[in-house]
Amino acid sequence: TTAAPWWTSAVVYQVYPRSFADADGDGVGDLAGLASRLDHLERLGVDVVWLSPVYASPQADNGYDISDYQAIDPVFGTLEDFDRLLAEVHARGMKLVMDLVVNHTSDEHPWFAESRSSQDNPKRDWYWWRPPRDGFAAGEPGAEPTNWESFFSGPAWTLDEKTGEYYLHLFDRKQPDLNWENPEVRHAVYDMMRWWLDRGVDGFRMDVINLISKDPALPDGATTGTGGLGDGFPHYGTGPRIHEFLQEMHREVFRGRTGEFLTVGEMPGVTWEDARLFTDPARGEVDMVFQFEHVSLDHGQGGKFDPKPLDLRDLKASLGRWQAALAETGWNSLYWCNHDQPRVVSRFGDDGQWWRESATAWATVLHLHRGTPFVYQGEELGMTNAPFAGVHEMRDVESLNHHRRQVEAGVDPDVVLRGLRAMGRDNARTPVQWDATPNAGFTSGEPWLAVNPNHSWLNAEAQYDDPRSVFNHYRRLIGLRHELPVVALGDFRMLLADHPHVYAYERALDGVRLLVVANLGGAEQTVDVDPAWSDADVVLSNTDAAHVSAGRVELGPWAALVLKR
Ligand code: TEU
């Protein structure tokens, strides 16, 4: 047997730089701001920083629309600032992983400027260009080459007047999709990746990487979308050449390179069967994937902006299946939060009376699964969703597009707003709450997105020295993964699968056993466990209201208990 890879005992912290810390007072976070707050990350104990995009970008999707892969956007700083940050991260014994956004570029990338300039430009084929549908004139409703709906509302095709053809964009019209069928595109991406690795970065989180292989026939999808649009996912999600492309990337970029790297593929719609293939080390694709099954369980009939309450049994069935599927081959990532998801304490917890208990209970449940946990900035403080009064306070392109299209289609604006308030991505993007000063210590200027007013009491400064704080609970969980091999590598066994409120599981490695049991609701619960647990050591708890005796565990509201024997 070979030694377990380093990332099996690592915890990753995601920085969304625009909202982390602003050093120059322009209201937007930057690299110098991040460098000034590395003490926070060291104190928390994380091993890796994943940095959301800082490349040159028109910022139509906050940097997920890149116009130069080898430059830093001036809003974030310079390449010198980047090199300094990287050196400081390394000096503190942490690694830095970049976001790799290569399903699409910005429409302002020079590649796209060339590609759109004429039908016979050498880079025409670097993107997906198609004439209007047969029998339709360019620009006529329904003339789009396929009926696919974009992830950000409306058709996934936009007409370029100059050449009379449409280009494909699975996201915003300012994010044209690259054509990975063209080997020049692939090799340009690999060159760029090598350039960053040569600079010293420790790997990549690969944005929507399972969407890069489209069926070149571009068939229509079943018409499920708004306004007669169709679901193209079967024709571009985990497409025909995806494994080939990722193996080629791995060979071209990582083979023969010495060092410890991390690759994570973000993969909407990925199944556990696919994930096992993607993360089987023998296949040389990626180390782990971000899957979306568990964060889709509260999506209702109308999709993500029509949420329904989470049934805890569904969550246990889902995560339990992923634990089992990747037990022997492959590896799981573990997350509740990122810059695209609402805050977990507001979404699945109670951000009122039981704020601290519910934030720490959800943290406990996540971190002690088998897999690599990801903490999203502010999650370690228990940051909550934002109290948006209206869409005018939101900035996210997905939310704004959705609002405009729905209202145009005649949906009640109050209903649209309700969905956005619950699920909109700006909930995760309000500035990090460092202290109780007017802009929470985030900026001396006007923040690009309003600071949550609850920073008066919910902030890092208030938590560092409080042993019961959310921050210190995360710090202890991260410490457990480093200290106890059973946390990193133990087997996983789900318990009480049918219980609607209690999440419980056992981990085991070399005769050491861990029991994790958490009440994910506001009413007291009592559950039966193996009596052998009665005299076990309490490793961690988030409350005084949790007791074990004679094969019974009594749990107060949102109580979480971790035992070891
Ligand atoms: O997200 C891809 C994705 O599938 C979703 O999470 C998406 O944000 C949305 O929820 C669809 O409803 C990645 C990035 O994480 C996201 O920030 C980008 O906007 C997107 O890709 C495009 O680059």
Image (spheres, helix red, strand yellow):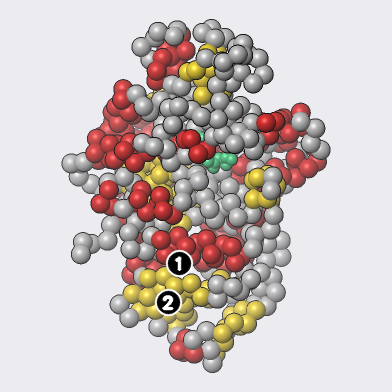
- Horizontal and vertical percent for residue 296? 58, 51
Which residue reaches farthest left? 256
Give the position of the N terminus as an image quadrant. bottom left
Element under disc 1: loop
- Left or right side of 426 for 48: left
Tell me the residue that label 2 is attached to.
Answer: 514
**Residue 458 appears in the picture as rendered:** no
Kindly indicate the quadrant of the structure image that contains residue 523.
Answer: bottom right
- Number of residues whose C-alpha sits closer than 10 Å to that of mark 1, classed few (under 14), some (14–19) or many (20 or more): many
* Residue situated in front as seen by the camera: 341 or 296: 296
For the point 27% across and 48% down, the residue is 283
Q: CA distance from mark 1 to mark 2?
A: 9 Å
- Left or right side of 33 for 390: right
Tell me the residue that label 1 is attached to.
Answer: 368
* Residue situated in front as seen by the camera: 26 or 60: 60
Q: Are marks 1 and 2 in contact (CB under 8 Å)?
A: yes
Give the vertical position of 6 relative to 176 (above or below): below
